[in-house]
């Protein structure tokens, strides 16, 4: 049968009566509402005037099912499939429009991928080829979980309790995939027998992969149950229906059930393996590869029925908007760090404005002139159209990641060079005997206000007091301020990187710790003191270069041409 017929709206003064209102009045005169206050149904609309309208009983059933709030009648446990008949778009559908699940259920399911993607994006920075591989290895999982469920929904998801229970179980499996996102790393999927801090991190990543694999396998099992139930409904139709007509389309449900069952078996096997990382990854991702091939191959099978083009285009269009929204969330989050945090300059406003132009341009390029109502989905190329949304969506995420990385890096460089420029005169003034910083008052105020925005182990005021005690009222200073300032600058830069949520490499963290542990005790011998200062200065400048290159990895990855003009922070020091 075809989707629900929609009656034309009547202009004021018309003597005709809305058939749906007339049906309600005849069935329950005391419960009829005036047309202006009649609650609306929640089902999608589609133009199906070429098909006969559903009976008054069906219209009345749909109205009482979803359109009367808490007074709505209970859902049916199972909605029977109808004989697939072509509508005016030459598409064959299994359910009337009034039998389909409301759009609110689909939007509710979309919220899960938003949450899962946000959790993963917050804990995984995209700044190198390996990080992109990690990001894609997780993104393809959650993208296909959403897409594979959507392919079922547009064909068979009815407004009954059975499908709501299935959707609730799928939501739980999807949410668990998100809960295991924080430590997900396909390069660490096996456990170690060592007992150390590094071993604990490796084991946490292995547990994360196992959790994702189990949750994905559970999701595949749920899809198998859903398609298997459709097979039962096709083989055992209700009375007065043609058995041969239904058996001709059995491949539409049987083939996916077999494929998802095989994929789920591969994923659960990968989850249970305790060694051989290549084997675990090969088993897991070969399951997704088989599922992708099945979507491309299924249109060639006899009895295949294309998914309704309008519905499938609306769903994937909605997912595209979700991906754009996730990118906007990341941009706004980064801009909030830039504007309200350390190192803000007026150029940040221009960066924000340009980024928003890029976001709007991306939306305009993809959605201008697109209409779900006129969209046509071909039998063979339609499946490829669906799959190509994966690289499209991932490219959008990479685009926004590159914008965020460039913006954050620019402001970090501004902040660090400004710290260097403000701190150097203060050190020189204190070495010249100005312990109260009277000659560098403006620099001292700047350091006080700006460093107050950071989570510093040693606040600026406390550091100044320590320096004053170390060199004041002493014939010979207790500390060498030049060397001591190197360690404090390193402490500031670590705090700046933390404020922008930039991950530093383990090598750089160890190098920073070495700078913090420099011996700043005053050396009485001038020759010995100068030699020590020169050695520490060499280490310090190397640290500056390594630090600037480390935080710029993301910029150089997304914008390789920048390597020709890329400045080291030491250039400004």
Image: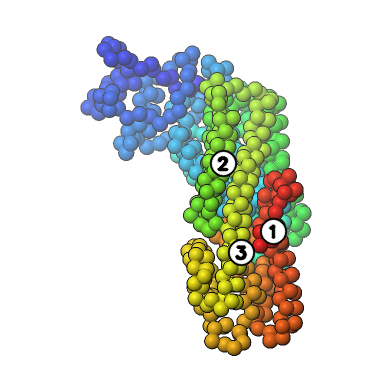
In the rendered picture of this protein, how many numbered marks are placed on residues? 3
Describe the element under mark 2 as helix, strand or loop. Answer: helix
Task: Give the number of the disc on residue 571.
Answer: 1
Q: Residues within 10 Å of mark 1 (few under 14, many from 20)?
A: few
Q: Based on the displayed image, in which of its 4 quarters is residue 149 positioned?
A: top right
Tell me what residue is drawn at x 47 percent, y 19 percent.
47
Q: Position of residue 190 (x, y in %)?
A: 71, 61
> Can residue 153 be seen from the camera position used here?
no
From the top left corner, tell me how far across and down residue 337 is, in percent: 52, 54
In the picture of the structure, the residue carrying the numbered disc 3 is: 420
Tell me: residue 72, above or below residue 442.
above
Residue 275 % position (x, y):
75, 61
**346 or 138: nearer the eye?**
346
Q: Which residue is mark 2?
A: 355
Marks 2 and 3 sit apart, C-alpha to C-alpha, by: 29 Å
**Image quadrant containing the C terminus:** bottom right
In the image, which is nearer the foreground, mark 2 or mark 1? 1
Separation of residues labelled 2 and 1 (CA atoms): 28 Å
Q: Earlier in the sequence, mark 2 or mark 3?
A: 2
At numbered mark 1, what does the secondary structure look like: helix, strand or loop?
A: helix
Residue sticking out furthest to the left: 30
Closer to the camera in the image, 404 or 526:
526
Residue at figure coordinates x 67%, y 38% from the top left: 391
Circle 3: is it few (<14), some (14-19), or many (20+) Cα within 10 Å?
Answer: some
Q: Residue 272's image quarter?
A: bottom right
**Residue at the bottom extreme of this rendering:** 475
In front: 399, or 158? 399
């Amino acid at each position: 049968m075809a989707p629900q017929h929609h009656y034309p709206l009547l202009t004021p003064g018309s003597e005709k009566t809305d058939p749906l209102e007339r049906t309600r009045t005849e069935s329950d005169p005391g419960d009829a509402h005036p047309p202006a206050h009649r609650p609306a149904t929640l089902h999608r609309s589609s133009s199906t005037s070429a098909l006969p309208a559903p009976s008054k009983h069906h219209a009345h059933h749909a109205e009482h099912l979803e359109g009367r709030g808490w007074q709505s009648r209970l859902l049916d446990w199972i909605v029977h499939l109808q004989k697939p008949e072509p509508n005016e778009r030459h598409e064959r559908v299994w359910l009337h429009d009034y039998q389909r699940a409301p759009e609110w259920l689909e939007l509710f399911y979309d919220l899960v991928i938003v949450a899962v993607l946000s959790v993963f994006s917050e804990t995984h920075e995209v700044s190198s080829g390996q990080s992109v591989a990690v990001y894609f290895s997780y993104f393809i999982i959650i993208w296909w979980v959403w897409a594979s469920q959507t392919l079922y929904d547009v064909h068979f998801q009815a407004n009954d309790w059975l499908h709501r229970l299935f959707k609730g179980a799928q939501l739980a499996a999807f949410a668990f995939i998100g809960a295991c996102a924080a430590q997900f790393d396909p390069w660490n999927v096996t456990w170690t027998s060592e007992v150390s801090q590094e071993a604990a991190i490796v084991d946490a990543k292995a547990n994360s992969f196992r959790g994702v694999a189990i949750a994905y396998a559970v999701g595949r099992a749920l899809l198998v149950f859903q398609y298997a139930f459709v097979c039962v409904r096709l083989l055992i139709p209700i009375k007065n229906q043609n058995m041969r007509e239904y058996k001709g389309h059995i491949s539409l449900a049987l083939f996916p059930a077999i494929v998802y069952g095989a994929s789920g078996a591969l994923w659960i096997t990968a989850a249970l393996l305790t060694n051989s990382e290549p084997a675990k990854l090969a088993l897991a991702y070969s399951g997704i590869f088989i599922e992708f091939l099945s979507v491309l191959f299924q249109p060639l099978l006899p009895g295949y029925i294309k998914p309704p083009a309008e519905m499938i285009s609306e769903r994937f269009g909605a997912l595209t908007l979700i991906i754009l929204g996730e990118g906007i969330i990341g941009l706004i989050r980064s801009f909030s760090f830039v504007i309200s945090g350390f190192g803000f300059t007026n150029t940040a406003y221009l960066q924000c404005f340009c980024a928003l132009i890029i976001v709007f341009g991306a939306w305009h390029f993809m959605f201008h002139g697109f209409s779900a109502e006129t969209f046509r989905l071909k039998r063979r190329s339609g499946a490829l159209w669906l799959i190509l949304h994966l690289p499209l969506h991932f490219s959008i995420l990479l685009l926004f990641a590159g914008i965020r990385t460039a913006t954050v890096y620019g402001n970090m460089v501004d902040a660090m060079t400004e710290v260097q420029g403000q701190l150097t005169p203060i050190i020189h003034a204190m070495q010249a005997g100005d312990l109260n910083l009277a000659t560098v008052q403006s620099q001292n105020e700047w350091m006080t206000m700006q460093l107050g925005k950071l989570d510093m182990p040693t606040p600026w005021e406390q550091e100044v007091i320590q320096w004053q005690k170390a060199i004041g009222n002493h014939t010979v200073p207790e500390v060498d301020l030049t060397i001591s300032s190197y360690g404090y600058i390193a402490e500031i830069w670590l705090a700046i990187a933390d404020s922008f949520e930039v991950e530093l490499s383990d090598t750089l963290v160890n190098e920073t710790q070495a700078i913090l542990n420099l011996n700043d005790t005053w050396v009485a011998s001038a020759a010995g003191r100068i030699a020590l200062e020169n050695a520490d200065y060499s280490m310090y400048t190397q640290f500056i270069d390594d630090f600037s290159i480390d935080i710029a990895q993301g910029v150089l990855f997304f914008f390789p041409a920048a390597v020709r003009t890329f400045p080291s922070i030491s250039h400004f020091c």
